[in-house]
Image (tube, rainbow, N blue to C red):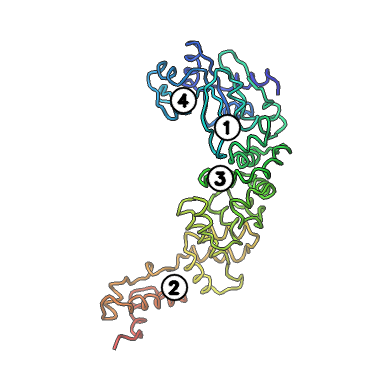
Amino acid sequence: MNEQHAIARFEQFTVPAPVRTVVEALVQAGHQAFLVGGCVRDVLRGQPPKDFDVATSARPEQVQRLFRRVIPTGIEHGTVTVVQDKAHVEVTTFRAEAEYLDGRRPSKVEFHTDIEADLSRRDFTINAMAFDLVAKKLVDPFGGAADLSARLVRCVRSALERFLEDGLRPMRAVRFATVLGFEIEPGTEAAIGQTLHVFRKVATERVNQEFTKMLLSPRVATGLELSRRTGLLAEFLPEAVAADFAAVARAREDLTLRLSVLLAGANGAYELVHRLKFPNKVATDVAHLVAHQALPEPAASDVALRRWLSKVRLEAAEPVLELARALGRADPTLEGRLRAQIAARPPLTTKALALNGAQVMEALGVGPSPLVGQATAFLLERVLEEPSLNTPEALRRLLEGVPRPG
């Protein structure tokens, strides 16, 4: 992709008016201002960006003086948010970063007036491009446009240095390759295995963000395989190294379902999902699906199917069937029979019984006691065997045979 092609892409795309206003105001005030990073990458790919970031030679205090409303969102790192026509536009001063001492953040940030110096600190060439909206010029010192055309994820300059600076970058390389459908340049991929000790320092929450994007990608199997091949997966989720990645890809793009497929063969699904800092509900739902992944035998009786549905819970029945399909364990006949049972809406829980707890106590002539729970469980078992028994009269007759305390 040459510069004229890049300029044509931007001419075809309408940059939001608030973003253009901010850029033009900065330039009119004598500063440099560029669109940078992901928005440039996405426009060149012909995709609408999710957001637009502006980089400028203006210092944060100069930006604050230039606009009526500015939020100091990350002013210590040179970033402020300009509120323009109710839109929020993130503006960051050109910067270079001093040595990374902990594999997570630079020891200090230095402001620059050189856009190329700013781009040189970025992770990958496809993210190290800038576009001048006013002069209609692409700034691409590291060949990002060419790598976009070649569908390559390549580090800016030395991959080893970039990964030693920030341990999350290897995970981001895999995520970009997965989501964009790119290859990782061989030298960049080779550097991942050499910097796993830095990756171990990364906060789990940051790993979670990249992993989630990977899991929800149509090319999730590629991402998981890259994670395994580079050693990343063994670092943050070794329990999934032997998983069937093709099965994960067969599942629809749902976080809970894909995690369940990935961890179907692992022990302690709840603990694993919780360890990765997913919400408690996700951990609970994944653990439930994994625990109930075994389907009834195709020739199982209707009673057995209702007992299975009672244990699985009606709302989880379809996700469990989806899990089974992804794992290659589906049986169309069994699915049809289960759906017929679901459609018949049989009573599957104690709440669905025609007698509530107070009515059970009245029928037994007792107050609150363990006997009430035992009697209710007895009634549910009988109703699972024969749903037509779920009437107040029939249940009271069944309770007549329940032994009362002496």
Is 28 drawn above or below residue 243 in the view shown? Answer: above
Q: Position of residue 214 (x, y in %)?
A: 60, 44
**For the image shown, how many numbered marks are present on the structure?**
4
Q: Residues within 10 Å of mark 2 (few under 14, many from 20)?
A: some
| Residue contact at pointers 4 and 2, CB within 8 angstroms | no
Return the residue at label 1: 99
Q: Nearer the viewer, residue 65 or 300?
A: 65
Q: Position of residue 190 (x, y in %)?
A: 71, 41
- 342 left or right of 261 in image: left
Q: Residue at x 47, y 14 (%)?
A: 25
Disc on the earlier residue, 3 or 2: 3
Q: Secondary structure at mark 2?
A: helix
Point out which mark residue 387 bears. Answer: 2
Disc on the earlier residue, 4 or 1: 4
Q: Residues within 10 Å of mark 1 (few under 14, many from 20)?
A: few
Is 228 drawn above or below residue 353 in the view shown? Answer: above
Q: How far apart are the alpha carbons under marks 2 and 1?
A: 71 Å
Q: Secondary structure at mark 4?
A: strand
**Residue type, mark 4 in image:** Val
Point out which mark residue 89 bears. Answer: 4
Disc on the earlier residue, 3 or 1: 1
Disc on the earlier residue, 4 or 2: 4
**Residue type, mark 2 in image:** Pro
**Residue type, mark 3 in image:** Lys
| Residue contact at pointers 3 and 1, CB within 8 angstroms | no
Q: Residues within 10 Å of mark 3 (few under 14, many from 20)?
A: some
**Residue type, mark 1 in image:** Glu
Return the residue at label 3: 201
Q: Residue at x 52, y 28 (%)?
A: 109
Q: Nearer the viewer, residue 41 or 54?
A: 54
Q: Nearer the viewer, residue 352 or 256?
A: 256
